[in-house]
Amino acid sequence: MANRVEPRDRIRRSRPVLWARVFYFGQTAVVGHPPPAVERKRKMSNHSEERYEDSQLYRIRHSAAHIMAQAVLEYYPEAKYTIGPPIENGFYYDFDLPQPITNEDLEKIEKRMRQIIAGGHPFVKEVVSAEEARQIFKDQPYKLELIQGLEQGGFDEYGNPLDTKPEISIYKHDTFVDLCRGPHVENTRQINPSAIKLMSIAGAYWRGDEKNKMLTRIYGTAWRTAQELEEYLAMLEEARKRDHRKLGKELEIFIYDDEVGPGLPLWLPNGGIMIEELERLAKEMEEKAGYLRVRTPHVTKEDLFIRSGHLPYYAESMYPPMELEGVRYYVKPMNCPMHHKIFASKPRSYRDLPIRLAEYGTCYRYEKSGELFGLMRVRSMQMNDAHIYCAEEQFEQEFMGVIDLYKKYFELFGIQKYVMRLSLHAKAGLGKKYVDNERLWLKTEDMVRRAMTNGGVPFVEAQDEAAFYGPKIDVQIWSAIGREFTLATNQVDFAVPERFDLKFVNKDGVEETPLCIHRAPLSTHERMIGFLIEHYAGAFPVWLCPEQVRVIPITDAQNEYASQIAAQLRAEGIRVNVDTGAERMNAKIRQAQLMKVPYMLVVGNNEMASGTVSLRMRDGSQQNSIPLGEFLARIKERIAKRSSEL
RNA sequence: GCCACCGUAGCUCAGCUGGCAGAGCAGACGAUUCGUAAUCGUCCGGUCAAGGGUUCAAAUCCCUUCGGUGGCUCCA
């Protein structure tokens, strides 16, 4: 119960997520990887740490946004300004500009901001009536819209409903006035002119709605000191180095080819090995947890997806149909309908439940071109999918069984920076994005909430993030460059089993519809490997490494010996290569290091004479002249345990 | 899909306001046989994303398409 995050902390759509306090005060946090909600919670209660919104840094960033808006309006007097909040690591401001803005303009604006800061202007708050506000912003249509929202007591600046009617206030500094509830620094001088930097220009819809006009957003970063800024920029640089798109190419894991198409990755041999290892892991774990493996086709008739609800609710993300002999077929975006058919293939008794059907199924989703992102967001994906059919009284145990599975995987991979998110429906979406049965939504949402709370698993809640057929627990992670993704997911389906007329006979001999849990603890191969590349910065644990050992003969005279060593390792199932190239040993070691091969076995005359190997590990440490058997025992033990140790 | 920017050799990148396409790495070949992150030399390699236009002349300017990047929207 104590783990439940208060509504104030709920993640809300379109609202800037305020991780910065954690990031800033955190000691182990990596850029773009906010620590889990648990940690945030604990820190807040134990150390009475101030909220980001109350911090000086928040004020600095908020004030920097105003100063930037002033500078932009000086260069573009016809520009309309909208909103500009502090966010993680900085701030932004959205403008409706008469012309596109360039990176050179950004430099000018930044320079002007420093002048304004040097001017030592006080920030002055004034509470005004709606009428006065309308007068002040009479030429600013976006501000007038905001004023109306505030006056009606309905909506905040992001268009989210408010509980209470807020006061209307303005903040002035120098020549600039903004509709704003604050808080701000007292004087522009409290902003360090050498600790701010404008970062990028982006498009953003007014109020985050794609039906609205596209505005120009300028992102900036602001810190207390120049050194903090430098450190932040250096961390961004480090993060770019572990970007899976960059490492994936360097380590020859996957490629994209223009003729194949966007979002359709080609797995290179190294990626193929990693996929095989992940599937082996999944099969082992699922076998122990009582799953049964099934296989289903990639294409099915339209009728199936009409019944499942995919065409009514999910068609936008599906590839268009192909028609053959008057029948329309779709490539599957999910595996569930076929699994439902397998469940329905024979009568089921309560004694058979739960039935857990698993498949690493390949699905295709037509993601909009701009949404694609490396391996993290693709159009063809292979899911660590399974569907658990159970009676309502089995639900909690089964649901938490899946959560336990997550935890085991996360422990194995050392994944600590994630947030479990209870994704709920939104009333407005009923009948459109969501199956139209509010009673069952509320009921299943509460079942999940209770299960998580009883299990003592911390989570946050998010409105309007559910699947069309039910609520879910999503595991949110962050890419190296800070983008948020759902890695694993655990979903309740109260709707589709009924549409498929799925039944089991209960103890009383009466037919009952089972609940279905959709789950994908290892995500898709695409997203999982994308994530793992970044998580390990390409230095995978030995069991997952495409190349586990490279044997490096010092001169050609040891080539034969090196090959014998490799043959012995290969016979034990180790992935090993021999570098018989003409380069010097130093160059061979460098190449192996760049490919992040965990073990290098250097063999020269000494080793050959004594029948040993010299072990150099990826971390630079080395053990000279050890018997091959000793190394073999070490690596076999690491692989068997899927250890993260070298 | 939308806004902005980008696309030069397999990879990383030079190529200023239009005037004969370059480097390093990789690859091939030759020499070298070396003790823990780059040995030397020679050679090969490009319809400058594709298509159209402006111009005496286009990698460079303009348009369209394709692909990518940063965001927005959307999501495993």
Image (cartoon, coloured by chain):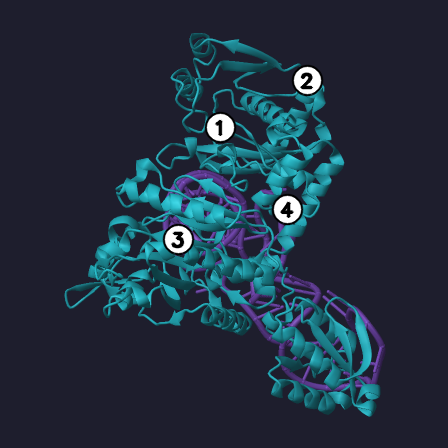
Chain colours: A cyan, B purple
**Distance of label 1 from label 3 (alpha carbons):** 39 Å
Position of residue B63 measured from the top left corner of the image (x, y, whole percent): 39, 44
Query: Badge 4: few (under 14), some or many (20 or more) residues near its Cα, within 10 Å?
Result: many
Q: Provide the residue designation for mark 3.
A: A491
First along the sequence among labels 4 and 1: 4
- A307 up-or-down from A75: above or below: below
Which secondary structure lies at badge 2?
A: loop
Asked whether A101 or A131 is in front, the reply is A131
Badge 2: chain ID: A
First along the sequence among labels 2 and 1: 1
Q: Do badges 4 and 2 share one subunit?
A: yes
- A63 up-or-down from A469: above or below: above
- A40 up-or-down from A206: above or below: below
Q: What is the quadrant of residue A44 in the picture?
A: top right
Q: Do badges 3 and 2 share one subunit?
A: yes
Whether residue A544 is visible, yes or no, is yes
Check residue A31 in the rendering and tell me which mark sits there, or answer none. Answer: 4
Image marks 2 and 1: residues in contact by CB distance under 8 Å: no
How many numbered discs? 4
Q: What is the quadrant of residue B32 in the picture?
A: bottom right
Which secondary structure lies at badge 1?
A: strand
Left or right of A186 in this view: A457: left
Front of the two marks 2 and 1? 2
Badge 1: chain ID: A
First along the sequence among labels 1 and 3: 1
**Distance of label 4 from label 3 (alpha carbons):** 29 Å
What kind of residue is marked 4?
Answer: Val
Check residue A187 in the rendering and tell me which mark sits there, or answer none. Answer: 2
Q: Provide the residue designation for mark 1.
A: A95
What kind of residue is marked 1?
Answer: Phe
